[in-house]
Image (cartoon, grey):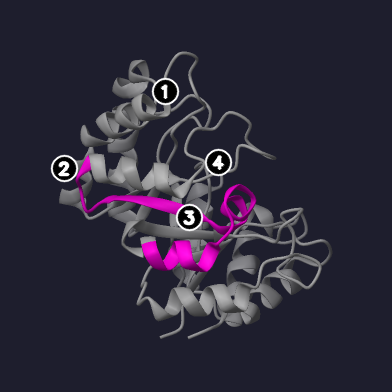
């Protein structure tokens, strides 16, 4: 089985190209999903364009914010309310997963305490996610280059959170670019932890650009390894092409069209 590919539309849309045109081109290339970060003024337009061209809305952010997140118990009431609202939207539109954020490290809080706080926050809403069939995907980000201070910056820490939550809907968003920066050993890590992964993001490293020969990740091998695990959810492209957006999207699809 080939992997199901999606793309983060803000990375590929241009001022000259409508969302409908972008979705039409992506579907013609072979994509089965499109995704966003935060719902904005164009959300209804995206929903309609995706439906017209047979694309699944693969993912969106479930709560705010990336830096002030679940590791702060003072945020749990707010985040629970935001996640419940996002879960309702996801269930209505067929979105399989929502992105969740640990937040940046808090002074005086150990990594173990932070993991416990994130897990406690997710446990409050996990039964609702289970009832609605929606994954809560905690995003793994690098704290070395792009997101200084972010706490969920290693796979083992994220897996520990998921174990603590104790729900089949508590998963990880494994961003291949970010985890290459933080720990490498990408294929082995994916194979060993696929049961905890609910979504993937791609980008070339360094630079978060095209999946080409100017970056160090072998995306053909990585996506073949993902396919071989039996993973059935989405692998989504989250990079900004150096030149033509559609050509970058087309090339990425070809590189990752593995089984």
Marked residue nearer the N-terminal end (2 or 4) = 4
Measured from the top left, where is residue 121 in percent x and y?
Answer: 28, 29
- In the image: residue 167, left or right of residue 176: left
Q: Residues within 10 Å of mark 2 (few under 14, many from 20)?
A: some
Dot 1 and dot 3 residues touching (CB under 8 Å):
no
Q: Secondary structure at mark 3?
A: strand
CA separation in Å, label 2 and label 1: 27 Å
Marked residue nearer the N-terminal end (3 or 2) = 2
- Tell me if residue 99 can be seen: no
Marked residue nearer the N-terminal end (1 or 3) = 1
Marked residue nearer the N-terminal end (2 or 1) = 1
Q: Which residue is mark 2?
A: 127
CA separation in Å, label 3 and label 2: 23 Å
Q: Which residue is mark 1?
A: 110
Q: Residues within 10 Å of mark 3 (few under 14, many from 20)?
A: many
| Nearest to viewer (mark 2 / mark 4) | 2
- Tell me if residue 65 can be seen: yes
């Amino acid at each position: 089985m080939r992997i199901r590919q999606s793309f983060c539309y803000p990375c590929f849309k241009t001022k000259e190209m409508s969302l409908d045109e972008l979705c039409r081109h992506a579907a013609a290339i072979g994509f089965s999903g499109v995704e966003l970060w935060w719902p904005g003024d164009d959300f209804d337009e995206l929903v309609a364009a995706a439906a017209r061209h047979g694309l699944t809305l693969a993912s969106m952010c479930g709560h705010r914010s990336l830096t002030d997140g679940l590791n702060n118990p003072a945020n749990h009431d707010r985040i629970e309310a935001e996640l419940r609202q996002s879960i309702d939207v996801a269930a209505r539109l067929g979105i399989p997963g929502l992105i969740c954020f640990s937040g940046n490290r808090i002074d005086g809080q150990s990594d173990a305490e932070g993991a416990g706080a994130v897990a406690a926050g997710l446990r409050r809403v996990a039964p609702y996610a289970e009832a609605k069939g929606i994954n809560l995907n905690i995003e793994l980000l690098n704290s070395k280059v792009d997101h200084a201070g972010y706490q969920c910056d290693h796979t083992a820490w994220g897996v520990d959170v998921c174990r603590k939550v104790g729900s089949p809907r508590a998963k990880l968003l494994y961003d291949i670019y970010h985890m290459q920066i933080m720990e490498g050993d990408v294929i082995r890590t994916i194979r060993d932890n696929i049961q905890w992964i609910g979504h993937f993001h791609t980008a070339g490293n360094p630079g978060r650009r095209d999946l080409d020969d100017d970056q160090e990740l072998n995306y053909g091998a990585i996506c073949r390894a993902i396919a071989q695990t039996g993973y059935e959810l989405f692998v989504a492209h989250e990079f900004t092409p150096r030149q033509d957006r559609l050509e970058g999207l087309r090339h990425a699809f070809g590189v990752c069209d593995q089984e």
